[in-house]
Image: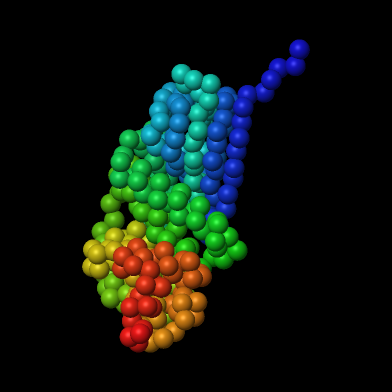
Amino acid sequence: MTKTPPDHRSHVFGTPWEGVHGTAMDSARHYGRHWHSTYGVGLLDHGAQSSASGRGKVDAYAGDLITTNPGEVHDGRPLGGPSRRWRMVYFDAAVMAGMRGDGAAGNGIEFTRPVLRDARLGDALRRLFVRLDAWQAVHADHTAGAGALACEESLAEVCGLLLETHSTVLPVREAGGDVRQLRERLADDLLDAPSLDELATMAGLSKYQALRRFAQAYGVPPHAWLLLQRAERARALIRRGTSLADAAAASGFADQSHMTRIFTRHFGFTPGAWQRASGPPS
């Protein structure tokens, strides 16, 4: 009698950056002992899992965060049910070094626990998955633009929180960092959004430091500030009689529907309503 293999559904996906990929798994498989050459952080969405780790046997439940270090031997099997569902993002040590900004991350740095319960980090990781899904749907053949910047912000936030609160890395003093030039760079060319790496280099900060410092100074992170500026430009163009489609293109939106979503979110009314309200009296 042929043995039925366990249910297993998997999806591996790319990202805007080299050295970073993600997976989405819904699986009843028992994974044998193995290791990855990358860092990994993920979210257990459903079910539960028991696994070996570099710190002994651990159990994870729905809502928990899970991590792996490069070279850390681990396995995995369902716990208390036939299957479990989880999402992961994996990144090379060089990516972690770039996030920290001093070249030391990835040189003996480890995540301290294989299972985490951290609401702030969990929210950041969920935002990263949502933004990567949106990027794949719209910008899968591009590595620049506002969509990639949004993804990079989320990745920097996830890595920064991991390094600050769940790793063996020593705190790094934040020096320098005039973020006014970052705002000016964003405003100079709304059609060509810079990467977070470019912004961090300009300010002499790590990506996470630049993200945090910008939000402290201007109330929102760079990506949100850029979308606000694009919405304001579109509003001004429409008021001067520019068509909705041309206003969307001239303001850096992917298309008119993208402009409508952002415009409505920020102003509370659609571009069409604004066009009618700002036109000549009938």
* Residue lying at the far front of the rendered structure: 282
* Screen quadrant of the C terminus: bottom left
Q: Please, is residue 38 above or below residue 279 in the view?
A: above
Q: Quadrant of residue 203?
A: bottom left
Residue 132 shows in the view: yes
In the picture, the quarter occupied by the N terminus is top right
The location of residue 174, given as percent across then percent down, is 26, 62
Q: Nearer the viewer, residue 262 or 77?
A: 262
Question: In the picture shown, does residue 121 fall above or below 174?
Answer: above
Check the image and report above or below for 43 versus 236: above
| 140 left or right, relative to 52 | right
Residue 32's spot in the image, x, y percent?
58, 26
Q: Position of residue 264 (x, y in %)?
A: 36, 65
Residue, x 60% and y 38% (percent of image)?
10
**Would residue 98 be visible to someone looking at this image?**
no
Name the one closer to the observer, 37 or 238: 238
Left or right, residue 57 beside residue 25: left
Question: Which residue lies at the image location 46% right of the left edge and 18% below the top edge?
Answer: 80
Q: Position of residue 66 (x, y in %)?
A: 42, 36
Q: Is residue 195 left or right of residue 179?
A: right
Q: Is residue 98 above or below residue 117?
A: below
- How was the colour assigned to the protein in this rendering? rainbow
Q: Residue at x 34, y 67 (%)?
A: 269
Hey, which residue is sitting farthest top in the picture? 1
Residue 235 picture quarter:
bottom left
**Total marks placed:** 0
x 45%, y 51%: residue: 130
Asked which quadrant contains residue 265, the reply is bottom left
